[in-house]
Image (cartoon, rainbow, N blue to C red):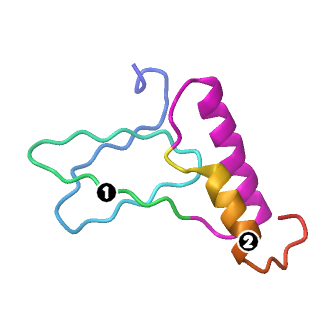
Amino acid sequence: DLYEANVPVYRFIQRPGDLVWLNTGTVHWGQAIGWCNNISWNVGPLTAYQYKLAVERYEWNKLQSVKSMVPMVHLSWNMARNIKVSDHKL
């Protein structure tokens, strides 16, 4: 259906040791073709834009009743408590 609607789709097999890097807001889905150990890291630059995107996704997830992978409230308090921020927008 996605191909017919001209929605770009990338399908590949991730081999042991491979790293997959997805951009902000990328809709993705993983499926194991055998035994696997699923580990994911959520990383991003410490910028106002990245933080805004993360908060927007967190709020959207709440509206959709989807548990967010990033604990934004905890992350926000830790950032406020532990990081000297030079970007006044952040």
Alpha carbons under labels 1 and 2: distance apart: 27 Å
The structure residue drawn at horizontal position 18% and vertical position 60%, both measured from the top left corner, is 15
**Residue 47, position as x, y percentages in the image:** 74, 67
Q: Residue at x 13, y 42 (%)?
A: 33
**Dot 1 surroundings within 10 Å: few (below 14), some, or many (20 or more)?**
few
Label 2 sits on residue: 81
Count of numbered circles in the view: 2
In the picture as drawn, the residue positioned furthest to the left comes out as 34
For this rendering, which residue is in front, 2 or 25?
Answer: 25
Residue 39: give its label. 1
Residue 18 location, x and y as percent? 26, 65
| Start-end of magenta stretch | 44-68
Mark 2 or mark 1, which is nearer the start of the sequence? 1
The residue that appears at 18% across and 42% down in the rendered structure is: 32
Q: What residue type is labelled 1?
A: Ile
Q: In which quarter of the image is the N terminus?
A: top left
